[in-house]
Image (spheres, rainbow, N blue to C red):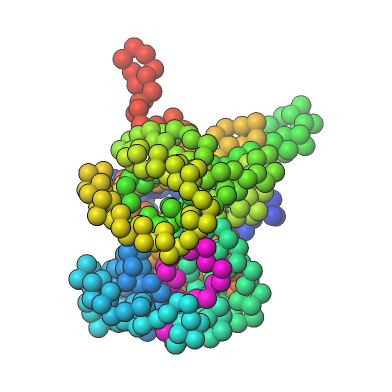
């Protein structure tokens, strides 16, 4: 992997100083990292280690609620791999409803069949059962989805009750995330550091968006300071400062088939069809229908142009509130196209009470899995995140993360958050991923999450990431 990093020596406005970062552009190359400018000029060589730091050495206990599910087991496997390459004696506990699912998990991931990985039974609807399962944990990871229609944050509340130092969930539902944030004061009182929506998307995508925003503001600041050196330009510096704001940020997601993650992601998608979508347009909160506002987006080489649709995702509200971005939307699409057509039909034709019936939706998702697996075998499980960020009256930057296997990168992403929390400093309260720069090493987190990615680039000119080269004429093209 190679990395492109540019830095500059000025301070952001006080409201954004906590989010200050470097620009990183990762290219899957020959497993080496370099520091280069955005134009590709090398600044210096740097070997950035993604191995577990010495601060994690010792006997840590990580409890994964829903640990035998697809996301939980992938996360456990990624964490176990990272720990096995270190001198850490940390333990992983997979907490789920029955021992049979644990046996299936260790069969799927033989590396988890070890003395450091154990099973505990848990009922996520019973806080006392959760408290018993997480006793003695240093970190609890909640992967027990789908999170849609869930009214209470039982796992987080249990962590607060027994003062577990660290909590992480992979929530992808706006209502659940807001409920988690409402427990902020209780988490502070119990000295719990909690991150909600910390998976791949949302999660890694939120941090990518935060860095895109910072890079845009940094570039605008540099340009304005250069202009201010000219006496004529200085008189208009106040109006220029007004332009140093983000005009819009667009989250664009694509996953082929079910992404190989199983019935949970399928059920999540169906449940999202029953949720009204919240977006922000010019600072105003707007409600839209689910699976609406179709758009075709170019996700770059290896993925190409894909249709995506509006869905209600938590990063829209969190990024809007944290960075005061006036226009922000999140779209998702899949392949083959018939799945998108089916989702649109569900959102338009099925009654709301049916789409919000979690038990029924999970049954439907399970029943469809044989067909889904056949389709997945044909289309694969490639995923891509594309984030477009526009400066007011200024340039657009694009960030891109593409991986050939969602089932792997979702586990790597959760593991990246988990390791960052165990290695980082405590910051009591409940946080969105965008808010973690003061106590987590976000650059290391991104490096870990992106291992094996075919594309991972931040804050680039859009044309650089398009799937087709730009023809300059005379037989010359830019790839």
Q: Is residue 151 magenta?
A: yes
Q: Quadrant of residue 226?
A: top right
* x 79%, y 31%: residue: 235
User: Dominant secondary structure of the magenta stretch?
Assistant: loop
- In this rendering, would 153 be left or right of 386? right
Q: For the C terminus, give its image quadrant.
A: top left
Can residue 193 be seen?
Answer: yes
Q: x and y percent of residue 367 in the render?
A: 30, 58
Relative depth, front residue between 111 and 292: 292
Check the image and name the residue furthest to the top: 474
Check the image and name the residue furthest to the right: 235
- Give the answer, above or below, for where 373 lies relative to 280: below
Q: How many numbered tags mark residues here?
A: 0
* x 56%, y 71%: residue: 152
Can residue 49 be seen?
Answer: no
* x 42%, y 61%: residue: 360
Q: x and y percent of residue 286 in the render?
A: 65, 44
Relative depth, front residue between 275 and 334: 275
- In this rendering, would 313 be left or right of 134? right
Highlighted range, magenta: 133-155
Q: Is residue 220 magenta?
A: no
Relative depth, front residue between 198 and 457: 198
Q: x and y percent of residue 399 in the render?
A: 46, 42
Relative depth, front residue between 425 and 357: 357
Q: Quadrant of residue 248?
A: top right
Q: x and y percent of residue 320 in the render?
A: 63, 50
* x 57%, y 48%: residue: 277
- In this rendering, would 447 be left or right of 325? left
């Amino acid at each position: 992997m190679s990395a492109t990093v540019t830095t500059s020596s000025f301070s952001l406005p006080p409201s954004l100083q906590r989010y200050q970062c470097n620009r990183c552009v990762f290219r899957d190359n020959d497993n080496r990292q370099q520091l280069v400018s955005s134009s590709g000029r090398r600044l210096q060589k740097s070997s950035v280690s993604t191995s577990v730091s010495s601060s994690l050495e010792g006997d840590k206990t990580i409890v994964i609620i829903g640990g035998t599910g697809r996301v939980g087991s992938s996360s456990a496997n990624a964490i176990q791999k990272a720990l096995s390459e270190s001198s850490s004696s940390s333990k992983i506990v997979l907490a789920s409803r029955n021992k049979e699912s644990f046996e299936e998990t260790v069969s799927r991931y033989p590396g988890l069949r070890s003395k450091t990985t154990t099973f505990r039974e848990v009922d996520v609807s019973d806080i006392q059962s959760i408290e018993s399962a997480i006793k003695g944990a240093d970190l609890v990871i909640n992967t027990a989805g789908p999170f849609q229609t869930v009214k209470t944050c039982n796992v987080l509340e249990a962590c607060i009750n027994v003062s577990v130092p660290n909590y992480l969930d992979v929530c992808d539902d706006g209502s659940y995330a807001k409920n988690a944030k409402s427990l902020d004061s209780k988490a502070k009182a119990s000295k719990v550091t909690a991150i909600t929506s910390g998976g791949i998307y949302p999660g890694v995508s939120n941090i990518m968006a935060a860095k895109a925003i910072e890079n845009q503001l940094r570039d605008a600041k540099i340009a304005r300071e250069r202009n201010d050196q000219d006496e004529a330009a200085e008189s208009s510096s106040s109006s220029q400062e007004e332009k140093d704001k983000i005009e819009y940020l667009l989250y664009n997601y694509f996953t082929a088939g079910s992404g190989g993650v199983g019935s949970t992601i399928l059920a999540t998608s169906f449940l999202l069809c029953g949720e009204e979508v919240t977006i922000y347009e010019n600072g105003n909160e707007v409600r839209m229908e689910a699976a609406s506002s179709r758009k075709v987006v170019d996700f770059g080489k290896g993925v190409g142009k894909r249709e995506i649709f509006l869905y209600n995702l938590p990063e829209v509200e969190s990024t809007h509130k944290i960075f005061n971005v006036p226009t922000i939307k999140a779209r998702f699409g899949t392949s083959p196209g018939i799945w998108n057509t089916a989702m649109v039909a569900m959102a338009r034709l099925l009654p709301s009470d049916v789409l919000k019936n979690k038990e029924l939706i999970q049954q439907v998702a399970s029943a469809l899995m044989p067909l889904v697996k056949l389709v997945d075998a044909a289309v694969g499980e490639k995923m891509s995140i594309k984030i477009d960020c526009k400066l007011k009256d200024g340039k657009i930057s694009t960030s891109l993360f593409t991986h050939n296997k969602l089932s792997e990168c979702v586990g790597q992403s959760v593991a990246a958050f988990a390791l960052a929390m165990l290695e980082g400093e405590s910051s009591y309260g409940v946080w969105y991923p965008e808010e973690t720069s003061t106590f987590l090493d976000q650059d290391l987190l991104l490096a870990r999450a992106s291992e094996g990615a075919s594309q991972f680039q931040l804050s680039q000119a859009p044309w650089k990431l398009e799937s087709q080269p730009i023809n300059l004429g005379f037989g010359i093209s830019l790839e």
